[in-house]
């Protein structure tokens, strides 16, 4: 099954066993912006969908029957109310959805525009802010993070399959960060990157890990470069340059 999110709804392409024929289902949420649709790899059944609807605004939907029916989150990702004198923020879009570790079957993460990170502990029904990111890291980097047409984005939320508390994120015009304590604190991953380019527009950070020691991380930039790390982001080296504007990087399994 191929899941496709578009500016006018979501589509699902189901193939036969030989992958020679495909039938399309949808559009789901016709006329609404669907930023991300993901299948839960832990049960192979649950679908989560991030949409910006005309009447509900940015929210998350869940399906447990393969997309035949959907239920909206009771509490979608929302920034906390600003105190008097503070500048408030509102979620413009839920841009990214990631399932948590296999040991946390009902947990999910969401990334938003403007920059925000949220966690669900009940399968996507309710979402709470990851305070270590929203209140800890964001205030430190907000003046350095530039704006893109749809707003600065938190994307590519990755969970280390060996450690539920080790998280990685990519930020458009902000670089890459990781947390070893479940999102309470964050560190910039920039060793080996040129200092003047540490705040690159990162496009689609990708992750792959085997069952032993090595953990690979990859990201592409709008300037056409691809960088790789073989030690979970501790050090980076350039593996490609002078490519066209990069939109995505995906790490495929060995074949």
Image: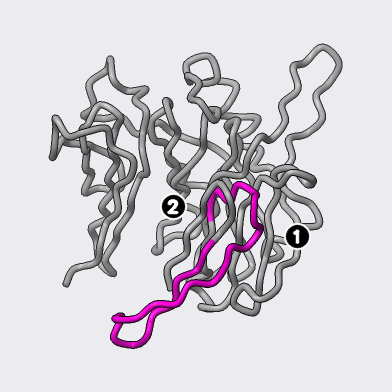
Q: Distance from label 1 to label 2 (Cα)?
A: 24 Å
The quadrant where residue 114 appears = top right
Q: Residue furthest bottom?
A: 17
Question: Which residue is depicted at the point 30% across and 53% down?
Answer: 250
As for residue 118 lying within the magenta part, the answer is no
Magenta region, residue range: 11-36
Q: Secondary structure at mark 1?
A: strand
User: Residue 60: x, y in percent?
Assistant: 68, 54
Q: Which residue is mark 2?
A: 158
Q: Residue furthest right?
A: 84
Q: Is residue 163 above or below residue 114?
A: below
Question: Which residue is depicted at the point 71% across and 64% down?
Answer: 122
- Sequence-first tag of 1 and 2: 1
The quadrant where residue 1 appears = bottom left
User: Residue 49: x, y in percent?
Assistant: 61, 58
Question: Which residue is depicted at the point 52% across and 51% down?
Answer: 6
Residue 189 located left or right of residue 86: left
User: Residue 36: x, y in percent?
Assistant: 53, 53
The quadrant where residue 77 appears = top right
Q: Which mark is residue 72?
A: 1
Q: How is the image coloured?
A: one colour
Contact between labelled residues 2 and 1, with CB atoms less than 8 Å apart: no
**Closer to us: 14 or 184:** 14
Which quadrant of the figure contains the C terminus?
bottom left
Q: Residues within 10 Å of mark 1 (few under 14, many from 20)?
A: some
Is any atom of residue 199 visible in this view?
yes
Is any atom of residue 100 visible in this view?
no
């Amino acid at each position: 099954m191929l899941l496709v999110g578009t500016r006018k709804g979501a589509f699902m392409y189901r193939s036969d066993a030989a992958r020679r024929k495909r039938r399309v289902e949808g559009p789901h949420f016709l006329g609404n912006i669907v930023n991300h649709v993901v299948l839960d790899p832990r049960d192979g059944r649950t679908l989560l969908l991030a949409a910006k609807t005309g009447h509900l605004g940015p929210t998350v939907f869940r399906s447990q029957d393969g997309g035949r029916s959907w239920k909206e989150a009771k509490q979608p990702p929302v920034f906390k109310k600003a105190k008097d004198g503070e500048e408030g923020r509102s979620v413009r879009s839920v841009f990214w959805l990631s399932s948590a570790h296999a040991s946390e079957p009902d947990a999910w993460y969401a990334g938003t525009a403007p920059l925000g990170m949220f966690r669900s502990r009940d399968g996507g029904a309710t979402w709470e802010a990851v305070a270590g990111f929203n209140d800890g890291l964001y205030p430190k980097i907000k003046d350095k993070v530039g704006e893109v047409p749809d707003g600065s984005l938190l994307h590519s939320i990755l969970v280390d399959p060996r450690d539920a508390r080790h998280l990685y994120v990519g930020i458009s015009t902000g670089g890459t960060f990781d947390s070893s304590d479940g999102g309470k604190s964050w560190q910039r991953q920039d060793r080996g990157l040129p200092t003047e380019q540490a705040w690159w527009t990162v496009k689609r950070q990708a992750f792959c890990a085997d069952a032993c020691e090595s953990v690979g991380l990859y990201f592409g930039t709008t300037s056409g470069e691809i960088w790789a790390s073989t030690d979970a982001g501790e050090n980076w080296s350039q593996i490609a340059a002078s490519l066209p504007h990069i939109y995505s990087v995906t790490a495929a399994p060995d074949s």
